[in-house]
Image (tube, rainbow, N blue to C red):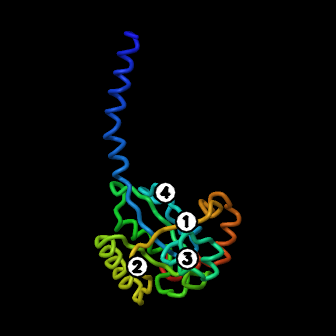
Amino acid sequence: MRRLLPLLLLALVGFLAALPAAAHAQAKREYAILASGCFWCTEADLEGVPGVLDVVSGYTGGREPNPTYEDVVGHRTGHREAVRVVYDPARITYDQLLRRFWPTLDPTDAEGQFCDRGRNYAAAIFVRNRAQRRAAALTKAEVERRLGRKVVTDILPETPFWPAEAYHQDYAEKNPLRYKTYRQGCGRDRTLRAVWGR
């Protein structure tokens, strides 16, 4: 037992020393809820951004709890396809994240995005506080000036976010051929080039 005591003390000291670092790592997580049409594409567009830790596809903005994909695409819930982006604010700020988000959508289209039509595919930024609302409004005004056209992307208060079914998560990574076919067929990249230029 005497031989084990120093080892146990050493392990305890190491554990206690790691606690502040673990708490600090947890404190570095923030999130944003964004919609730009098909959540497969929004997820794929934002997952590789430096500072983004995770992107989850889901539904938000509607009135029904625990919606299903069929309910949302059937226009029965008021929800939109969206993503929850978890990010490290020490590596990317909310403002910088929005600047990466805007070029992934057509901000002049109020009736959906690309080939996906209807309010459930309409672009939006769901804000959780005044700072997010201010950043969303400022970047929206910048986009409007840059494009020289009215930007109709909604800025809305955050509502509960419901993760989509497992088969929708990381869709582009799990189904690269189907995803590529869908994205090309929907004309997403062609429209983005037309709106934003190269």
Outermost front residue: 65
The residue at 33%/75% (across/down) is 133
Say which element carries label 2.
strand
Upstream in sequence: badge 2 or badge 3:
3
The kind of residue tagged 3 is: Gly
Q: Residue at the location (56% across, 69% down)? A: 66
CB within 8 Å, label 2 to label 4? no
Q: Is residue 1 left or right of residue 191?
A: left
* Residue 104 coordinates in the image, percent (x, y): 50, 73
Amino acid marked by disc 4: Asp
Mark 2 vs mark 1, CA separation in Å? 18 Å
Q: CA distance from mark 2 to mark 4?
A: 22 Å
**Residue at mark 3:** 37
Quadrant in the rendering for residue 172: bottom right
Q: Please provide percent x and percent y for residue 186.
A: 64, 78
Q: Nearer the viewer, mark 3 or mark 1?
A: 1
Label 2 crowd bin: few (<14), some (14–19), many (20+), radius 10 Å = some
Distance from Cα at disc 4 to Cα at disc 1? 10 Å
User: Considering depth in this image, is 181 or 166 the residue closer to the camera?
Assistant: 166
Report which residue position mark 4 lands on: 54
Q: Residue at x 29, y 70 (%)?
A: 131
Q: CA distance from mark 2 to mark 3?
A: 16 Å
Q: State the residue position of label 1.
A: 57
Q: Is residue 190 above or below residue 95?
A: below
Q: Nearer the viewer, mark 2 or mark 3?
A: 2
